[in-house]
Amino acid sequence: MIEAESVSKTYQLPRGRTLDAVREVSFTVPPGTIYGLLGPNGAGKTTLLRMLATILSPTSGRCIVAGADTVKNPQEARRRIGFLSGNTRLYGRLSPAEILRYFGRLYGMDDASIATRTEELASALGMADILGRRCEGLSTGQSQKTNIARVLVHDPPVLILDEPTLGLDIMTSRAILDFISESRTRGRTVLFSTHYMTEAEQLCDRIGLIHKGLLLAEGSKEELYARTDARNLQDAFLRLVADSDGGLLE
């Protein structure tokens, strides 16, 4: 459902300089799989997710989502994606219910379908009590739940989530992670970025470790532990970063 084929993104900087934000990254995420993209700030995670979500075009390589090329057929890809960006903002004067109605109509849904879907999402995310409140008065956690409901309103088969629990309290984070886990049982393909290693250990079927735009390694957590002789993802990641100074592990 998600394929990155030798994807690179190079930015042109002043005075003829360039920045290679993502370098020759390849991986595949099949249906019903949660894939975690791990790395520190500035590693290239957000750039890679934005290319897969059709927000940015790759300098080279291809991104395929649910069979649609994100450059050649971006509109078709967008119909099949629910994308949560780390800097998404809500319309303060609208309520969560109005937000969902607005975005549902953008996706061509009729009002009856939007109403049914709103009830489903409110129940799943525990946000029924805030549906009629203005977004400007919501807490950080309530706003993030509303944002997640917004990207799910059209029931997309692919979810691309950029730091979905960043800055949230433990209860809200748990609710969102539980919902992501439930999405897998429904057959959705989920790709999400995080720098919280414990989230990935608990949730992901496969994990990609990215640093300075390079995908250092990928696999199940057990495969990454075995590859680096580590007992947790933090140690595995640190050892891969150290090894990358002299070339990627084979």
Image (cartoon, rainbow, N blue to C red):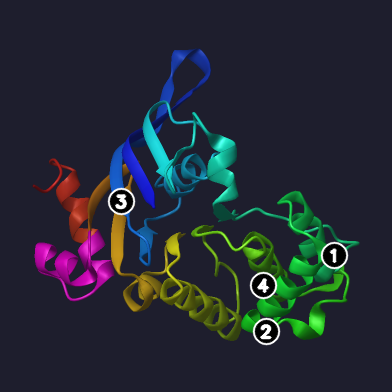
Q: Residue at x 55, y 52 (%)?
A: 81
Amino acid marked by disc 3: Thr
Local crowd at mark 3 within 10 Å, few (<14), some, or many (≥20)? few
**Is disc 3 placed on a helix, strand or loop?**
strand
Of 13 and 47, which appears nearest the observer?
47
Region in magenta: 219-237
Q: In the image, 145: left or right of 27? A: right
Residue 171: percent from left, percent from top = 58, 86
Amino acid marked by disc 2: Ser
Q: Residue at x 52, y 82 (%)?
A: 174
* Quadrant in the rendering for residue 147: bottom right
Amino acid marked by disc 4: Lys
Q: In the image, 88: left or right of 4? A: right
The numbered mark at residue 123 is 2
Q: In the image, 234: left or right of 147? A: left
Majority secondary structure in the magenta region: helix
Residue 189: percent from left, percent from top = 42, 61
For the question of whether residue 55 can be seen, the reply is: no
* Tag 3 residue: 28
